[in-house]
Amino acid sequence: IVNRDIVNLTNCESEPIHIPGSIQPHGFLLGIKKGDSRIEFCSANSAVYIGVGPETLLGKDISDIFPGEQASRFAMYAGEEVIDSAKPFVFSLNGTSFNTTVHQSGGNVIMELEPFPDGTLNLPNLYTQTRNFVSIMEKSSGLLDLCQEIADETRAITGYDRVMIYRFDDQYNGEVIAESRREDLVSFANQKYPHTDIPAQARELYIRNPLRMIADISYTPVPLLTIDDSADKGNHSLDLSLSILRSVSPMHIEYLKNMGVGATLTISLLQNQKLWGLIACHHYAPKILPHYTRLSALLQGHFLTSQIAVREVAEEYKISEEVDKALVEALALLHETENFMEASHRSPALLKLANATGAAIYHEGVLYTNGLVPSDSELLDLFTFLANAYPNQAFETDNLSDVYPAAKDISKYAAGAIYHSMVSGENDGILWLRQEKIETINWAGNPDKAVLPNEDGVQLSPRKSFELWMEIVKDKSAPWRKSEVNAASSFSYALQKHINYRIIRAQEDEN
Ligand code: BLA
């Protein structure tokens, strides 16, 4: 068993990635106090783009520097109205046009100016994109299908070498569930990545900011300055959580270098205010995606998230319909049969109502079984254990050996179980069993070595090898679905009634 919790205590999760004090160099940044028009923050590279450096810009009023009409647009954003999401506009100076995104960060208004890569504003065709999605929606049958289509479409729109749909599990380990890639690249499909690859504060940030771009992994960070700062320190007070130019954690840069990646775009996929997954795009050379193409990619993310719950519910619904049908059949048999226990081993519906591979009832010293079950003595031991551990209770698990180590010997029949105790004889109860489902997890690199100590032993760094590392998970069954657990409860309740009724009848007969 792997202990991955040790890395929870590392410095990874405490790195303040929202205040890096620097930006990426594919644009420049200006910050003004809200309600003021004096430039308070400036990135050190402004001269590269507009020929005027921070020493000139800092402390100046915007209208002293930019032509009148453009200054008033800046001023408008710095005004009283609340700015809650990035609003772009085009700003031109000396013949160069910049896509300018504006957003508010605490008491500051941040403007990020990026030159248009080919000098023009290339608007994507949203009509075509939307129409494509509608036809994708109609033709893809399940959620995985849909993810594949979205990966293909996102790659077609953006031109990244690899586009992955990455889904988190309960512990935030992630799996590549769909991938569209340049043909000559090795596939990452179905690979699993440990939760330590994306620390908690980064996941929190990605809930608030749904799109991030790293234009060039080998960039040199550009310091953010205020009047008092020296260029080599940078000013760390400006919160860049929602900024598009935010400089990325050096840890993550090292990770991507180890992977051989040159540029990335990452889009959050949210469900119920939680991070469900990511659209993760890799390029093997530097790549700047223009603002409007980024929005197109973001739209693909919205398309997908709008369908996740719908598809999951639809898939669950199909199963629950089958389960309900089996439950009705099993209940009918229960009502029609004087001694259901005797008849139970002939009822396929009893198994089907929970999609179990085996079932057993222990009633007044007699064992009744159905399907694949362990030996009688093994079952009796199990009933005894469960009656003691969960008296008058229900219990379900996909890993019985967790609470009952002896289950390891019977995992061929009983790796997972739903148990309901019954009020009649000693240790009475009903069990649905599921056989072991051996799972192979293809980790991208040994997850125990996902985080490596550096020379000083305190600082940690990402692993260097992503060589396939297989983990075999044994002694577990497929997890029980809610509908299956509910059907088992309904049946157990009815069976208990049936038994009570028989006891009363027997007593009446005696009198
Ligand atoms: C961030 N790590 C990330 C991000 C991803 C990964 C997707 C988010 C980047 C973004 O949204 O822009 C991991 N990238 C992957 C994985 C794949 C991929 C799994 O392409 C699979 C194909 N990372 C480590 C270790 C540390 C670490 C050991 O492995 C810390 C010691 C840190 N990862 C780390 C940090 C961030 C990160 C700090 C946040 C980067 C940022 O936004 O500034």
Image (tube, helix red, strand yellow):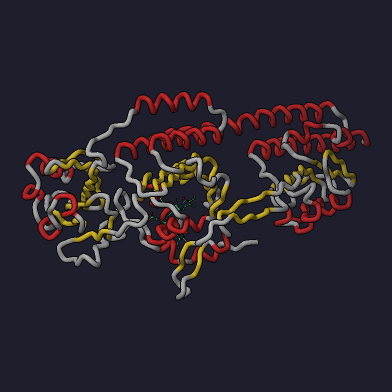
Location of the C terminus by quadrant is: top right
452 vs 107, left or right, is right
Q: Residue 187 falls in which quadrant of the image?
A: top right
Location of the N terminus by quadrant is: bottom right
Residue at screen point 84% across, 38% down: 370
434 vs 302, left or right, is right
Residue 499, given in percent of the width and then of the height, sits at 82, 37
Residue 270, given in percent of the width and then of the height, sits at 45, 42
**Outermost residue toward the front?**
184
Question: Taking the image as four quarters, which one is ligand 1 found in?
Answer: bottom left
**Outermost residue toward the bottom?**
456
Residue 149, given in percent of the width and then of the height, sits at 49, 33
Q: Nearer the viewer, residue 57 or 395?
A: 57
Res 272 seen here: no
Q: Residue 503 falls in which quadrant of the image?
A: top right
Residue at screen point 33% across, 28% down: 125
Res 95 seen here: yes
Q: How many marks?
A: 0
**Outermost residue toward the right?**
510
Q: Residue 189 falls in which quadrant of the image?
A: top right
Residue 404, given in percent of the width and then of the height, sits at 75, 57
311 vs 47, left or right, is right
446 vs 487, left or right, is left
Q: Nearer the viewer, residue 186 or 133?
A: 186
Residue at screen point 16% across, 66% down: 228
- Looking at the image, residue 145 lies above or below residue 117: above
